[in-house]
Amino acid sequence: MSLYFGLIYAYIYNQLKKVKAGSNGAAENGGEQSARGAPLAAFLVWLLLIPVCALECAAAPGPDPATGERLRQLSLEELGNLEVTTASKEPEEVWKTPAAIYVLTKEDIRRSGATSIPEALRLVPGVDVSRIDASTWAVGVRGFGSRFSQSVLVLIDGRNVYTPLFAGVNWTVQNVMLEDVARIEVIRGPGGTIWGTNAVNGVINIITEKSGDTQGALISGGGGNLEQGNAAVRYGGTFGRNFSYRVYGMAFRYGPELHPDGNNFDDWELGQGGFRLDWSNQKRDSISVQGDLYKGSVGESQSVAYYSPPAMRAINADEDASGGNILFKWQRKVNKASDFLLQAYYDRTWRLTSQLGEKRNTFDLDFTHHLRIFPRQELTWGLGARWSPSEFIQTVPTIVFRPFHQADNIYSAFLQDEIAILRNQLSLTLGTKFEHNIYTGWETLPGARILWTPTTRQSVWAAVTRAVRSPSRVDEDLELTDLYATTPVPQYLQLAHNGEFASEKLLGYEFGYRKLVTARIYFDLALFRNNYNDLASYGEPVIGPETSSNPPGLVAMIPWINGLVGTTEGFEIAPDWKPTPWLEMRGAWSYLNMNLRSKTGSDPGSTIAVYEGSSPRHKVVFQTRISLPKGFEFDPAYRYVSALPTQFPTGLPADYVRAYSTMDFRLARQMTRSLELSISGQNLFQPGHAEFSGDPGPLVLIRRTVYASVTWRQRESP
Amino acid sequence: MAPTTPQFRACMAIATVFAAMMLPNWRGRDDLFADNRRPTEYQVKAAYLANFAKFVEWPAGSITDDSPIPVCVAGQDPFGPALDAALSGERVGGHPLVARRIDGLRDVDGCRILFVSSNEALIDSVGSVERLPILTVSDAPDFLKHGGMIEFVLASNRVRFEINLAAARTAGLNISSELLRVATTVRKTP
């Protein structure tokens, strides 16, 4: 409770500071005034609305008892035909998970107003989402945010979307129809024992609905000033009792963010379609087959070094991205004490940018078996294999992956045992994964977790886990040349791989506490300390002549080494307060302190500054959801993100990503049982603010956006 | 600003949607069951529990004159106030229905309807009450296999139920044909 008040005070204080700054600014620049006035007005309306609504809604009968009253008049048959909102089984599972897990439910996603997965993740404690430009995001979990979310493993229905080319996730092409998403589970902290290498700082699990739960037709469309158009169509049906399916298609188009230099390169568009089939034989077997195909054109700006003048060229070009996947899953319940999952998928990606191109085919097979041998032990073991041949396509002379063809193959086995020391009160989970990759051979990823649930209203857990990020092609095979200076002779920097790059290692210590303070107040706390070793960095450059350039010049060969060690520590506090059925307030405060150092004492490439500058120290999110009479929903959210310490150490103030606070909202109304209208806005406090650097030119400013949408769902009558 | 810019189109789209949103009385009489006012899963399950009492005959003598019929919830209570709301004012054959929360199956004394929460230990021991005149209900998977009488199942966001008639007979309960007709499946052999 007091935390909420604290947050509100911080909020008001910030606003007052801003108003003061605004009035000073107005003296200098009158044009700014209206832009600064608007967010203040929005904030005041929000503040006023809560007490007004509290009075209004307290007087009116709330939806809950009225619904209950109506239910009493229904017959058994009518009850059976009524669609219900299911409180998912998650709370119970989350309660008993000895890890820092946060679940975004279908309702959370709908009411966030987000239209993409990274935007939806902004609400999750411990996850830093920074938008780089219209099409790219840096998503970090407990630090280390980067464009490809290095060290975060992302799965869509069990399909691993981590790309071995860049060691990360290309968020631009990871799109799902958000109406299909059942939930997104975010696990902060190392998850290598189950998920293997690269699940270092966190795991993001995107899980879509079974096709039986997405029956009938759905059509949605929308548009706004950034996302200029979005259309999605879905249809689900059944064949007999055991078989259901859905098909969908969607397309969207984004305009550019704000560019101070007028280089509006980042507009993009993408189309995607897919299907899912589910078959289930009562309760014993369930089989699903699903697939997607996409194609997009993504506006990018890149600076590329050349060996002939002009030696540095800024290239604006559209990235051509396409791909597809097909996934098969078979779950069987052998008996009460044993069940297994067999999963296989094929994933194809193709991308061609002004810097490089890659064609990749991934084949993956996984088997997981869960069994209870002894009364108090739950044993899970599994085997996995992945074969991922790829072909690099060279488009510029200064970026080469050698060899051009390579298969990144992985074999793995894991074993985990959950031991109930005291039934329903104390359990210990021990496990390890062994994973073989082509660069470093076998990696061992052990972990131990303990969970204590002294009462049904509180749980305490602690964990020690080891995780590694195995090298990827960018660590071992990339020959990248950049330009340092052109006078008096061209001077180049070249990344030099020695083929001895080791895995980055993490030993993580975690502690968590969850408490249901009253039936309506929930509180979740997680503390962590991560010890990193062998983090990647630049070594000491060796200078020599560069003969392939015209005119001949110099080149500094910079080794890519495992040069850094260090720690991160921090916490996430996430309270949730639901005072009435129509009002819910949630908050999250995430704190991170990163402390890295070079093993040799020198860090010539300033890699430490890049890592430490990649994630904010504080992130505060405060979200309110209000269900109003007449089908209205009003969901404002406030966000504060502290400054990114000098991310790229040019020393120029224009390159600093400053702290920002801003507000999002969603106003929606259920017009009929089938039709929903909504208007959502993001980043309302300022016309634009920087969140991350990474594109050439001045920092891209992320716009204030407004977006309107219409959703129609076919419904059977109750 | 030329009227064809994306900014202008965005403004028009938003203005149109906002205007449509403000239209009065669009929603018809199905107001209550629109998406955000849909009943919750456990409101419907509570309504079922209140209804079941009307379709079950307990052995003679197990319900005494004028005393209320206790509807018990064993283990963690998933209903909250929804159960009390569904039962309040309901009468079956002159007997009011009352909600009662119990910790384990040892405390079932007097219960006539028992909802067993989805807890493995509780479900495993449901056999211990199989001969008592209690209608056992749960939403745990395989509840019927463990000797339970009514199991709620969710299908396409709708709450349905299955009946184990053999278990009801063992306990001496008589389930009316109307309830059997509505059940998705009826298991007649143990």
Image (spheres, rainbow, N blue to C red):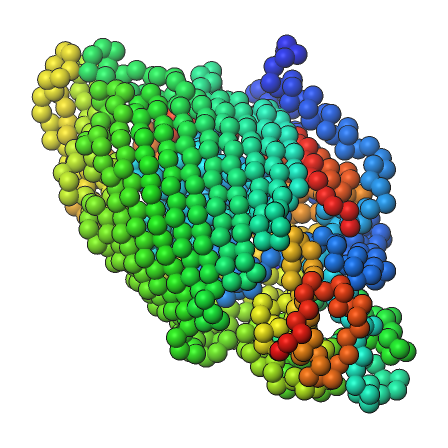
Q: Is residue A480 left or right of residue B114?
A: left
On screen, residue A393 above or below A438: above
Q: Residue at (45%, 66%) from the top-left corner?
A: A334
Residue B161 vs residue A251, the one in the foreground: B161
* Quarter placement of the C terminus of chain B: bottom right
Q: Position of residue A193 (x, y in %)?
A: 34, 59
- The reply to whether residue B165 is visible in this rendering is yes
Q: Residue at (84%, 52%) from the top-left corner?
A: A60
On screen, residue B7 above or below A54: above
On screen, residue A138 above or below B143: above
Furthest toward the bottom, the residue is B61
On screen, residue A225 above or below A172: above
- The reply to whether residue A606 is visible in this rendering is no
* Quarter placement of the N terminus of chain B: top right
Q: Position of residue A206 (x, y in %)?
A: 49, 47
Q: Is residue A546 left or right of residue B14?
A: left
